[in-house]
């Protein structure tokens, strides 16, 4: 019967990283995935260029029932560590906005790099076959005919099921007595109800805003869609939004208080729609002016009404009726409870030899490379303990 030091289930970002590092530490590693190819999510990320990390990575940019859990792994394997690996493989990269690092070429370069690292560690990779039954007895895990004293769950969350994502990690964890924090879609477009259909008619219009959900606020672009709201700012707040709660949009974050009254004094004959169109797309400016019911020239509007319009434009409420779900979610919030895992090693406290890493765990990053950095860091942390 084949013998390994560790069997890793899932050949995504976290699984590939963990396998490569453990293999290079002299461990005999078997990496299994039901998909036909490794790293499928890596390949589609960042528009095919892979937003592989973020230079502003910090624990406060991750959501978890235990906000302290990610600190250890993120401190020990940093964005610079992964960037050093990228540069050792001579992969050209560039920084976009907000610290996001992308390949100049193709996301395939990141997958090939990880496969090269696995080859250096003599990792055995098997793809395109069902994982099958997993049993545990006498301190050893058996997967089919293969067995090892260590098993790593790296099968991800339930986002993007068309890529083969399933709830395997959660079912498996529960089988071994680990708690699971309710999984829900994150970094996902939000949908609007029929009474806000007017905004859905702005489909395709995008503008820079500050979007807020609770105490979280993100200054990026929002996009109106035929179903509701999307764009980076909306995807970010979707991770903090809960059903039944509103989100608020500041359509003019660069404007200082009193700007409308000042515009009235300098351009009394202009209308609110024209004043808004100085900054916003025409269709959006028109819709907002109509919704505010202020069609007259500014000279004919009381300062009080203009101040009220400013306040509404700075915190425009939307009450989403849902999201576009796991099918459109970039990641999953929730997952295997960090209360049952060691933050140093990712090992299950109650089941020695069982580890969980990456998106399968209840740690979810912001948009912009943070979730890949968690995959690299958690995979590296587990590999140190295998």
Image (tube, grey):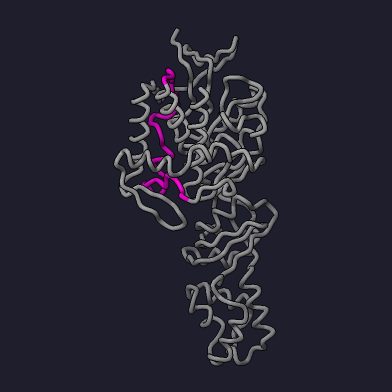
Q: In the rendered image, which quarter is residue 258 located in?
A: bottom right
Tell me the residue at 58%/40% (across/down). 71
* Of 344 and 134, the residue lying toward us: 344
Residue 217 drawn at (x, y percent): 60, 59
* Of 221 and 364, the residue lying toward us: 364
Tell me the residue at 62%/71% (across/down). 314
Tell me the residue at 59%/12% (across/down). 139
Tag count: 0
Q: Is residue 43 magenta?
A: yes
* Of 258 and 168, the residue lying toward us: 258
Residue interval drawn in magenta: 26-55
Residue 15 drawn at (x, y percent): 46, 30
Q: Is residue 105 left or right of residue 167?
A: left
The residue positioned farthest toward the top in the image shown: 1
The residue positioned farthest toward the front in the image shown: 76
Give the quarter of the figure containing the N terminus: top left
Q: Is residue 192 magenta?
A: no
Residue 299 drawn at (x, y percent): 60, 92
Q: Is residue 148 left or right of residue 192?
A: left
Tell me the residue at 48%/19% (across/down). 6
């Amino acid at each position: 019967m084949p013998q390994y030091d560790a069997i890793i289930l899932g050949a995504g970002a976290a699984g590939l990283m963990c396998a490569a590092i453990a293999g290079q530490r002299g461990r005999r590693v078997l990496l299994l995935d039901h998909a036909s190819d490794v790293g499928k999510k890596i390949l589609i990320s960042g528009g095919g260029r892979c937003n592989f990390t973020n230079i502003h990575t910090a624990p406060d940019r991750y959501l978890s029932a235990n906000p302290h859990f990610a600190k250890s792994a993120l401190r020990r394997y940093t964005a610079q560590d992964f960037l050093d690996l990228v540069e050792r493989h001579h992969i050209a990269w560039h920084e976009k906005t907000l610290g996001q690092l992308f390949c100049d070429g193709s996301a395939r370069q990141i997958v090939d790099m990880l496969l090269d690292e696995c080859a250096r560690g003599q990792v055995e990779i098997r793809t395109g076959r069902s994982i099958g039954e997993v049993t545990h007895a006498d301190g050893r895990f058996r997967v089919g005919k293969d067995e090892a004293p260590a098993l790593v769950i790296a099968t991800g969350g339930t986002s993007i099921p068309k890529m083969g994502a399933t709830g395997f990690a959660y079912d498996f964890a529960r089988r071994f007595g680990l708690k699971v924090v309710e999984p829900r879609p994150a970094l996902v477009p939000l949908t609007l109800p029929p009474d806000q259909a007017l905004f859905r008619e702005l489909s395709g219009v995008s503008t820079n805003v500050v979007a807020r959900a609770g105490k979280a606020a993100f200054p990026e672009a929002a996009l109106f869609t035929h179903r509701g709201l999307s764009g980076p700012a909306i995807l970010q707040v979707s991770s903090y939004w809960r059903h039944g709660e509103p989100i608020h949009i500041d359509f003019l974050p660069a404007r200082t208080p009193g700007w409308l009254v000042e515009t009235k004094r300098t351009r009394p004959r202009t209308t609110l729609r024209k004043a808004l169109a100085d900054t916003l797309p025409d269709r959006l400016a028109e819709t907002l002016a109509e919704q505010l019911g202020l069609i007259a020239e500014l000279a004919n509007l009381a300062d009080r009404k203009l101040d009220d319009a400013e306040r509404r434009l700075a915190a425009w409420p939307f009450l989403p009726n849902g999201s576009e779900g796991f099918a459109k979610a970039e990641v999953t919030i929730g997952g295997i409870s960090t209360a049952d895992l060691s933050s140093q090693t990712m090992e299950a406290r109650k089941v020695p030899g069982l580890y969980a890493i990456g998106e399968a765990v209840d740690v979810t990053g912001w948009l912009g490379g943070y979730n890949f950095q968690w995959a690299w860091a958690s995979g590296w942390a587990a590999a140190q303990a295998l």
